[in-house]
Image: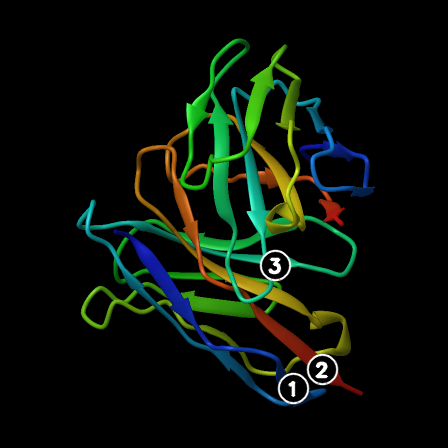
Amino acid sequence: EAAVTQSPRNKVTVTGGNVTLSCRQTNSHNYMYWYRQDTGHGLRLIHYSYGAGNLQIGDVPDGYKATRTTQEDFFLLLELASPSQTSLYFCASSVTGGAPDTQYFGPGTRLLVL
Amino acid sequence: GDSVTQTEGPVTVSESESLIINCTYSATSIAYPNLFWYVRYPGEGLQLLLKVITAGQKGSSRGFEATYNKETTSFHLQKASVQESDSAVYYCALGEGNNRIFFGDGTQLVVKP
């Protein structure tokens, strides 16, 4: 079973604050993804990566940076957090990026921006 | 663009009753998208429940089933007899073959004992 972990699980910050969300997968998957989910909305893709040093832009990238430092680790950075970024963030990974491939998700990080 | 619409929740059913969660999709970038149902239990991340990659085929898992209907662009999730442990949020999703999966808004299922 694929393992994806996220930290922290909960985070509170203030407007203008600097936040880093971490994700690690230990199954040698090539692809990693960051999503956000808001009440009444499905998961929306922020950024994704197909390997260390690679970054692809998703559907809602504004206000977010991401970095894939190793095959295992993918970070999401909010450099000037805003209340609109209050959300539930999920990280996921998959072996390949092909559509039939199952994505494995972490447990999520709840972020509150005051 | 590609999108998925599913039953708005919460959906409340009693244990042992049948369940259907509707899902319809719109695929503009690909003629035959891959279709998925994911489930998220409280405090956990999403996990794959079932997937179907061929139109006309049925997928099944844990007593749930869904049929890929190209004519009606639907992928409804059904279960004949739900259990309290099925309480979760269910997401219908569409994969368009280029590293992307589009998720519906999720349907919260509450099963009463």
Question: Is residue A103 left or right of B23 when viewed as pictured?
Answer: right
Q: Which mark is residue A84?
A: none
Q: Quadrant of residue B61?
A: bottom right
- Give the residue number, with chain letter if any, for mark 1: B12
Of the residues shown, which amino acid type is indicated by label 1? Thr
In the rendered structure, are the residues bearing label 1 and label 2 in contact, judged by CB atoms less than 8 Å apart?
Answer: yes
Furthest residue toward front = A16
- Give the residue number, with chain letter if any, for mark 3: B39
Question: Is residue A15 left or right of A67 when viewed as pictured?
Answer: right
Have a look at marks 1 and 2 and say if they share a chain. yes
Chain to which mark 2 belongs: B
Locate residue B27, reporting x and y percent.
Answer: 24, 54
Front residue (pair B35, A90): A90
- Residue visible at 79% across and 55% down in the picture: B43
Chain to which mark 1 belongs: B
Q: Which mark is residue B111?
A: 2
Element on which disc 2 rests = strand
Of the residues shown, which amino acid type is indicated by label 3? Val
- Residue visible at 49% across and 31% down in the picture: A47
